[in-house]
């Protein structure tokens, strides 16, 4: 890929394989979609963290330790998913594996919610899982085609 520097000179630096960045230097639409879905996960987790924080401040939990640890775990995952969204937003496909793992870990949660007959939440989470997997896998496939032998 040839890039032009601000002075107008051409630079023959190539885009690293697997970055998901098109020849224009912009991330693909699939990478941006994956970033948005990861961002939705972050917002939802921060909402859950807010619930735990409220429960902790009111002293309503059965165990203050359990509530505090749950709050910390949810915030930690929200921060990691925010980082994942940032990686996707830059156009890198290095976020494919963590995205697939995160969404695969949510599948047992969906199954448990269906088992508890909480169909509305289970279906919403299932849609979110599929919405997370589709752009991640599509971005990886697109980057693989772009960096293949015919590229």
Image (cartoon, rainbow, N blue to C red):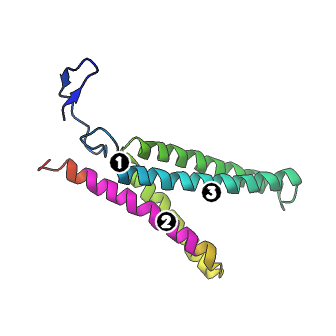
> Mark 1 — residue?
93
Q: Earlier in the sequence, mark 2 or mark 1?
A: 1
Q: Residue at x 76, y 55 (%)?
A: 52
Q: Secondary structure at mark 3?
A: helix
Element type where label 1 sits in the image: helix
> Magenta residues, as a range?
123-143
Q: How many marks?
A: 3
Disc nearer the start of the sequence (3/2): 3
Q: Secondary structure at mark 2?
A: helix
Whether tag 3 and tag 1 are in contact, CB under 8 A, the answer is no
Quarter assignment of residue 70: bottom right
Instruction: Give the overall secondary structure of the magenta segment.
Output: helix
Q: Position of residue 91 (x, y in %)?
A: 37, 44
- Taking the view exactly as shown, the residue that stands out farthest to the right is 59
The residue lying at 26 percent from left, 22 percent from top is 5
Is disc 2 surrounded by few (<14), some (14 to 19) or many (20+) residues within 10 Å?
Answer: many
Nearer-the-camera pick, 3 or 55:
3
Considering only vertical position in the picture, is 71 above or below 83? below
Q: Which residue carries the number 2 mark?
A: 129
**Residue at x 33%, y 54% (from the top left corner):** 139
Q: Position of residue 132 (x, y in %)?
A: 46, 60
Badge 3 vs badge 2, beta-carbon distance below 8 Å: no
Asked which quadrant contains residue 112, the reply is bottom right
Q: Nearer the viewer, mark 3 or mark 1?
A: 3
The residue positioned 35% from the left and 44% from the top of the image is 27
Q: Residue furthest left?
A: 150
Q: Which mark is residue 44?
A: 3
Left or right position of 29 against 115: left
Q: Position of residue 13 (x, y in %)?
A: 21, 29
């Amino acid at each position: 890929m040839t890039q032009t520097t601000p002075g107008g000179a051409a630079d023959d630096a190539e885009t690293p394989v697997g970055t998901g960045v098109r020849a224009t230097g912009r991330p693909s639409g699939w990478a941006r979609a994956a970033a948005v879905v990861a961002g939705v996960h972050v917002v939802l987790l921060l909402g859950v963290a807010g619930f735990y924080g409220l429960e902790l401040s009111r002293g309503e939990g059965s165990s203050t330790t359990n509530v505090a640890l749950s709050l910390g775990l949810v915030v930690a995952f929200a921060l990691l998913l925010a980082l994942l969204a940032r990686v996707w937003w830059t156009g890198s496909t290095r976020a494919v594996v963590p995205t697939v793992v995160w969404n695969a870990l949510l599948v047992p949660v969906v199954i448990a919610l269906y088992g508890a007959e909480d169909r509305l939440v289970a279906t919403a989470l299932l849609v979110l899982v599929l919405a997370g997997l589709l752009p991640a896998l599509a971005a990886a496939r697109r980057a693989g085609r772009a960096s293949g032998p015919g590229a």
